[in-house]
Image (spheres, helix red, strand yellow):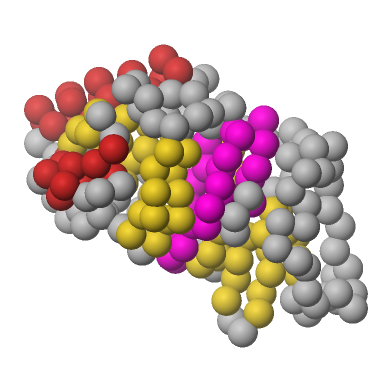
Amino acid sequence: KSVTTIGEYAFRYCSQLNTITVDKDNSVYSIVDGALIENKNDIERLILYPQANEEREIYTIPSDVTIIDGYAFYNQQKLKYIEMNDKVKIINEYAFHGMTQLRTITIPASVTTIKEIDGENGTLFLRMESAIPPALAKATNLAKDDVLIVPEGAAEAYKKHPAWGKFKNISEDPSLNKDSVPSSSNKVGSNIAQNILAFFTTIYFFSSKSDT
């Protein structure tokens, strides 16, 4: 319970690590659904989700986390879907690197900075809720099949961005426009997009959420 500092990337190469335990009286660190969370100066950051944890295929970022650390989900092979809250602001480098089962990530409009997007894990579907491209330091290993899905009317802004523009396939989805109500035709387009995503991953049914 006396631990108050954990060094950067401390567990990066712990490929067999499946569980982390924190004393309930620790004032800085806690475990939420298997992930190590740090709370300092009222800033919550997700430090690590163990590489060998096989408890779930869907992980929801805790509601007060604002920073996802570099290598936080490094080489995690079980997770297929990550749900983010609307308080996340920063996603650090290689946060999802090596996640070969992960195919779809939805980035909330609250995110202002992403250190890196890495497409080497396989075909990636990245859904952006912000019509304004967040800061992105670099995009690497992108393939022609990787898809960037943005709100209606935002494709041109993403295409002109020096990093986001590296995506060869940028499409719009009206369902990402939170302030608009999709028409019946838009709903058809959204259903088609969902069917395409389901081709690459197991079909899941999610309840409607206002924060994703």
Let me know if residue 133 appears in the view: yes
Q: Front-most of 148 and 211?
A: 148
Residue drawn at (63%, 45%) of the image: 73
**Residue located farthest toward the top when viewing the structure as drawn:** 199
Instruction: For the N terminus, give its image quadrant.
Output: bottom right
Q: Main secondary structure of the magenta part?
A: loop
All told, the count of numbered labels is 0
Residue drawn at (24%, 41%) of the image: 165
Q: Quadrant of residue 53?
A: top right
Residue 93 within the segment the image draws in magenta: yes
Let me know if residue 61 appears in the view: no
Q: Front-most of 116 and 128?
A: 116
Q: Is residue 118 above or below residue 209?
A: above
Q: Which residues are magenta?
A: 72-99
Q: Front-most of 151 and 91?
A: 91
Q: Quadrant of residue 9?
A: bottom right
Q: Position of residue 145 (x, y in %)?
A: 34, 21
Q: Front-most of 59 and 168?
A: 168
Q: Position of residue 207 (x, y in %)?
A: 43, 40
Q: Position of residue 175 (x, y in %)?
A: 22, 41
Specify whether 159 is left or right of 108. left
Residue drawn at (85%, 64%) of the image: 22
Residue drawn at (25%, 20%) of the image: 192
Residue 137 within the segment the image draws in magenta: no
Q: Is residue 48 above or below residue 28?
A: above
Q: Position of residue 12 (x, y in %)?
A: 74, 48
Specify whether 207 is left or right of 24. left
